[in-house]
Amino acid sequence: MQRVLEYLREKQRDFGGSPFVRFLQETRFSPQDRLSFLPCVAPFVLGFRDLDRALRGGEVEPPADGTNPHEGPHWALYVQDLQVLGLGTANDFAGMLRLLWGADGSQTRRALYDLIDLATGASPAKNQVLMMALEAMGRVTLEALAPIVRAFEARSRKKLVSIPFLSSKVEQGLWAETTVELDLRPEQEQEALAALDEAFQLLGELSDLLLAHMQHQLEVKRARFTWEPPSRLTFQEFGTARIQALCDAIGYDAENTETVKRFFTFMSSPWGERRIGTTPPWKSDITDDHTPFELSLAIESDRPEVRFLMEPQNAEGSTTLRTTWEDGLALNERLHQEFGVRLERFEQVKDLFEPVDPNARFALWHAFFLKSNGRPDVKIYLNPAARGPQHSKAVVREALERLGFTGAWRCLSEQVCGENDRILYFSLDLSAHRAARVKIYVSHQDTTAEELESVMALSKEYVPGEAWVFCQALKGPTGAFGTARTALTCLAFTSDEDERPSSVTLHVPVRCFARSDEESMERIRFLMEPHSHAVLGRAVAALAHRPLDVGTGLIQWASMRRQDGKVRTTFYLATEAYGVPAQQTVAPQPALRVSAEENPEMRRLNA
């Protein structure tokens, strides 16, 4: 039993340092801001007696005070506190329905049902361990809530009763009369440790969702005030502040955060010292409002990676297609001198991509990302249409042949590119490693989810049906992609095997199929585990300066690929330095409503 108790204390300490608890301890937010999650837990408060009954393995005795046995005294106190805080009311039938069956409480209901399932029919030893886990997490949460209650009461001269009531119950021991010292056999000890993992995982995911709700409420509150575009800030001031907010939201440590900010400052010098102004210096194609950089968040097995993409601007005069090329070349040299970035492969194809066509959308972009192991990587994007769109395929073919990837061109021309498809980007990892990639981005005109399956299937690890699910969830189940902003596939080739891509990534312009970023988040929810979606939710809330339901474009693209047995999803986030682009008209498309349990492809995508 000692091993179980030590593991319980370890899990309790970890939860005490979770983003949810840290937010509750953050005194720069008002008490109301830190208590805004309370309506979300209504199903748990009301349903606690059912959970208690399952944990005890039988019926609960009716309360001696005559209250409804399905409610308990804490329900009335909880409803009273919601009214005091101005967070809703359950005095009428409609209010009760909103509390218990509204969208805000959906994940709490799920967590409650899952816990009841864990406890139902379980051994007494397992249920006692579950009681200990619930009590441990409750103790940490209530300790964090106690100073919030005191601060609220001091400011408002109003009393909150439910949290002090629950704190006293926990201090007495919710299940003190039930728990006994256990002498566990080895197999029972393993069952107890597994039960602790399950309970802490369930409630940890729930706390992430409660945190996302509080951050969203903060975002809505901030948006009530007019947001002025940051015209007086420099690009570096604005960019590093956005990066700091994103890194804080997803839990990056100080060292990794400083690494991302340092590279952003270095790569945006010297033009980053210019003020943003009210109009973009160049109609950068990176974002819809022409901010010359975007941030992105890649999530793989709950491990987030922060990245950015930027287009060099002229530091003094006007930015033109030519200056973006020349400033990009200068950045290449500085990266080589300062960080040892390898330029040999770029030099082999440089002349092919030097911009000639004045209508080309861009010349040279640079991307940075910090891998989960802390290693920074840089890659570049070149424009196959630099000499004119009619030469794009010939330019890519020549570039691949110079780099020794003749098999890659055969794959592209014979199995990927249709007659009307366009090659938009040619990307190189700035590395001399054998695994350094050449990446080709293909825009598929008027394609369907079914047609994209054949391209995605070129990847060795691809699981049939994943592209279909991804498209249906983000775009809706009807119709083909259009031609303005259509789906892209990115095929990555390495020198180890250039006949077949090492991975294929599907990119969907989610903003083109949703009427708001709020709707985009709901569509994305279908594709992700709750914890991962909560990470994305915190990231989006940290970057948003407006309610998500009043505009679209903060979440620009969503992508997915399977590699090394895992699915990696990436979300490309605009900072909207020049405000929200004009609202586009989007025909309502019903989101895919099949659950992961009912859809085998979805189960594999979430695996």
Image (cartoon, helix red, strand yellow):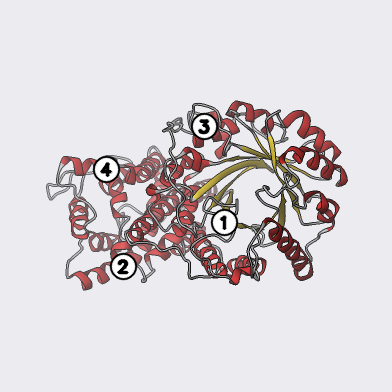
Residue 499 visible in the snapshot: no
For the residues labelled 3 and 1, the Cα–Cα distance comes to: 25 Å
For the residues labelled 2 and 1, the Cα–Cα distance comes to: 29 Å
The disc label shown at residue 100, or none: 4
Q: Residue at x 48, y 70 (%)?
A: 232
The disc label shown at residue 472, or none: 3
Q: Residue at x 83, y 43 (%)?
A: 400
Q: Nearer the viewer, mark 1 or mark 4?
A: 1
Q: Nearer the viewer, mark 2 or mark 1?
A: 1
User: Which residue in the structure is indicated by mark 2?
Assistant: 30
* Residue 351 coordinates in the image, percent (x, y): 82, 52
User: Which residue in the structure is indicated by mark 1?
Assistant: 295
Determine whether the residue tagged by mark 3 lies in a helix, strand or loop: helix
For the residues labelled 4 and 3, the Cα–Cα distance comes to: 30 Å
Return the disc, 1 or 4, that comes first in the chain's sequence.
4
Q: Nearer the viewer, mark 2 or mark 3?
A: 3
Return the disc, 2 or 1, that comes first in the chain's sequence.
2
* Residue 388 coordinates in the image, percent (x, y): 73, 43
Q: Amino acid at mark 1?
A: Leu
Q: Amino acid at mark 2?
A: Ser
* 375 displayed left or right of 61: right
Return the disc, 4 or 3, that comes first in the chain's sequence.
4
The vertical placement of 475 against 341, above or below, is above
Determine whether the residue tagged by mark 1 lies in a helix, strand or loop: strand
For the residues labelled 2 and 3, the Cα–Cα distance comes to: 41 Å
